[in-house]
Amino acid sequence: RAPASGCMVSSQALTTLLGYPAQVLAALLPALAELEDSSDLGHTAAISVDRVVAWAWNEGRLARATRLLAAGEKAPPIRVSRYWLCGQALYSVADGMHRTTAARQAGRKRITAVISGEVQCHPERYLIERSTGRLWREVPPDKRLITLVQWDIGPELAAALVAVGVRELVR
């Protein structure tokens, strides 16, 4: 179920965002996570490999996952959290990065995953101060107060945040 979103990002912009390195997306999702808008799920589903934020960080593990996939061995489901960003589901991997990468490289469209929980992301509630690398969040209900969320945002992550609708704060 796609939640309602105030996100002003087109599907084209989200496609552009998916062109960022997985490490950037892995940092972006929790930065925008609204924990008060989260829920536990714990169910298994076949999800789109293209929506899973994963990268191979160990060539040996990737080779093993590729070999098992080619041999037709059934791998255990990957474990993910679902993040709703601009009405689209993206998945952050807790276990199974190499299995996901191997499936993607093999041209698989879907992968079995245990979805442990889901979180809403509301980029319109955030401001990025590029000159200092600080990410701020407006505090409801009056939005006159802001709170510091993260203070070490690099240029590539800042660009990705702006691409999904985080506003720039210029002082």
Image (cartoon, rainbow, N blue to C red):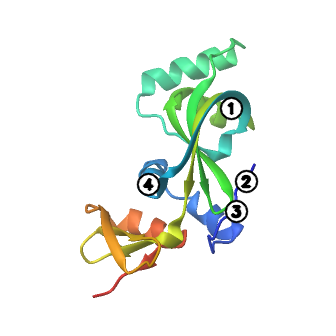
* Residue contact at pointers 2 and 1, CB within 8 angstroms: no
The residue carrying mark 3 is 4
Q: CA distance from mark 1 to mark 3?
A: 34 Å
Which residue sits at x=51%, y=26%? 62
Q: How many other residues sit within 10 Å of disc 4, few (<14), some (14-19) or many (≥20)?
A: many
Q: Describe residue 115's horizontal placement relative to residue 48 as left or right.
A: left
Q: Mark 2 vs mark 1: give the one in front.
A: 2
Tag shown at residue 2: 2
Q: Amino acid at mark 1?
A: Ala
Decide: is 87 above or below 111: below
* Residue contact at pointers 1 and 4, CB within 8 angstroms: no
Q: Amino acid at mark 2?
A: Ala
Q: Amino acid at mark 3?
A: Ala
Which quadrant would the C terminus be assigned to in this image?
bottom left
Q: Mark 4 vs mark 2: give the one in front.
A: 2
* Residue contact at pointers 1 and 3, CB within 8 angstroms: no
Decide: is 131 above or below 73: below
Q: Amino acid at mark 4?
A: Val
The residue carrying mark 1 is 106
The residue carrying mark 4 is 24
**Which residue appears farthest toward the front when viewing the image?**
141
Q: CA distance from mark 1 to mark 4?
A: 23 Å
Q: CA distance from mark 2 to mark 3?
A: 7 Å
- Badge 1 element: loop
Quarter occupied by residue 19: bottom right
Residue 73: percent from left, percent from top: 68, 11
Dot placed on the residue nearer the N-terminal end, 4 or 2: 2
